[in-house]
Image (tube, rainbow, N blue to C red):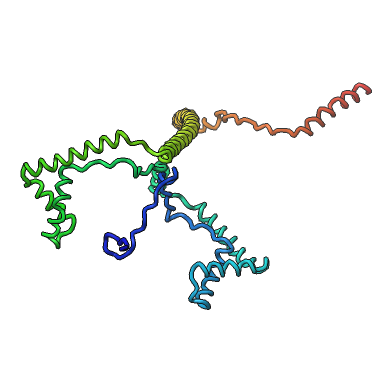
């Protein structure tokens, strides 16, 4: 029995397509959001530092070892190490962890990366196509292409598939009404067969379960997004209240400052008038400004400590008593 070969002529055997029997087989998992290339590199463990050094040594001493066998050798050597011997690698791991924490404090994710990550997370899992579902029939144009594709490729062997498709499109435009009618009749027959098969089609239990799983996953994602948006709204509401409060306080301070500025301007004007009046008076009667009363300075009353006040209060009644005795 002849072995099946690949259609591309590579000589490799065609791998058999696995039949989907479980519900999980019909669920296409969501793509994992890629890591930000600008983000700090994750810290290495003590074993990872040891493995890197040990692999280099093994590649020189045993160059024929495969990647898997090298990994086994590294694991065996690590298990044999004592706690004292591991201290060197543990110190390197601790230093690398400190480096990671320092870099993470300075790290700010790129807005484009954050938006891309949110978009991928929002997609969620998808439902695969059911292989048992009836396939749609061909159109009249596809029927015509299937009939004439081989002959067209033989006629134009050097042309690519795209160029052959363009040639078939030209032939379809130029074909006669009788051939077009045959193609349309075949397409109509396939359509009727498809409609009948689709009416009788019932998805398998596994596929229905998979559809339910995808639906539940999407509902959970929506619920999480809704919860996240409500939390964000609450935070924004608090922040708006804080901004409003600060604006009110700033407006009150600015108002007081404006009043103070007006009073300051008024004071400057009065002082100018006073200096002019004094100068005029000096002209009228020299030395008369010296006789004017000086502005009274307010005496600053120093606060007396509480202990001293108590002592004074205690001392006063003793004087009175002594006076009475005399």
Asked whether, in this view, residue 41 is left or right of residue 123, the answer is right
Quarter of the image with the C terminus is top right
Asked whether, in this view, residue 57 is left or right of residue 191, the answer is right
Q: Residue furthest top?
A: 324
User: In the depicted view, which residue is nearer to us: 255 or 305?
Assistant: 255
Percent coordinates x, y for residue 17 in the rendering: 36, 53
Percent coordinates x, y for residue 5 in the rendering: 30, 62
Q: Residue furthest right?
A: 325
Asked whether, in this view, residue 122 is left or right of residue 256, the answer is left
Please give the name of the residue rendered at 17% of the width and 46% of the height, measured from the top-left corner: 143
263 relative to 166, above or below: above
User: In the depicted view, which residue is nearer to us: 59 or 7?
Assistant: 7
Percent coordinates x, y for residue 171 in the rendering: 9, 49
User: In the depicted view, which residue is nearer to us: 188 or 100?
Assistant: 188
User: In the depicted view, which residue is nearer to us: 125 or 191?
Assistant: 191
Quarter of the image with the N terminus is bottom left
265 relative to 173, above or below: above
- Kindly tell me whether residue 267 is visible in this rendering: no
80 relative to 101, above or below: below
Please give the name of the residue rendered at 48% of the width and 52% of the height, measured from the top-left corner: 107
- Kindly tell me whether residue 20 is visible in this rendering: yes
307 relative to 11, above or below: above
Percent coordinates x, y for residue 207 in the rendering: 40, 40
């Amino acid at each position: 029995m002849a072995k099946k070969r690949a259609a591309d002529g590579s000589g490799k055997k065609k791998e058999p397509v696995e039949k989907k029997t479980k519900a999980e087989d019909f669920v296409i998992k969501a793509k994992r959001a890629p890591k930000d290339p600008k983000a700090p590199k994750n810290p290495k463990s003590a074993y990872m530092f040891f493995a890197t050094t040990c692999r280099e040594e093994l590649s020189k001493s045993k160059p024929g070892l495969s990647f898997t066998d090298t990994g086994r050798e590294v694991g065996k050597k690590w298990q044999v190490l004592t706690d004292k011997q591991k201290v060197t690698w543990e110190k390197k791991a601790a230093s690398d962890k400190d480096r990671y924490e320092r870099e993470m404090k300075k790290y700010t994710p790129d807005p484009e990366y954050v938006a891309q990550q949110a978009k991928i997370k929002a997609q969620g899992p998808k439902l695969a196509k059911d292989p048992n579902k009836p396939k749609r029939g061909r159109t009249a144009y596809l029927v015509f292409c299937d009939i004439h594709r081989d002959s067209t490729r033989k006629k134009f062997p050097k042309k690519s598939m795209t160029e052959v498709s363009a040639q078939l499109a030209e032939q379809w435009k130029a074909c006669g009404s009788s051939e077009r009618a045959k193609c349309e009749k075949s397409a109509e027959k396939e359509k009727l067969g498809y409609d009948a098969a689709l009416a009788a089609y019932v998805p398998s239990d596994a596929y229905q379960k998979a559809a339910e799983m995808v639906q539940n996953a999407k509902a959970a994602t929506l619920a999480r997004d809704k919860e996240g948006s409500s939390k964000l709204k609450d935070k924004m509401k608090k922040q708006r209240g804080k901004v409003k409060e600060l604006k009110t306080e700033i407006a009150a301070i600015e108002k007081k400052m404006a009043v103070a500025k007006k009073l300051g301007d008024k004071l400057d004007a009065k002082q100018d008038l006073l200096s002019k009046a004094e100068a005029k008076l000096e002209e009228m009667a020299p030395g008369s400004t010296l006789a004017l009363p000086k502005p009274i300075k307010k005496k600053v009353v120093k606060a007396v400590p509480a202990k001293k006040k108590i002592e004074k209060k205690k001392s006063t009644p003793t004087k009175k008593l002594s006076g009475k005795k005399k």
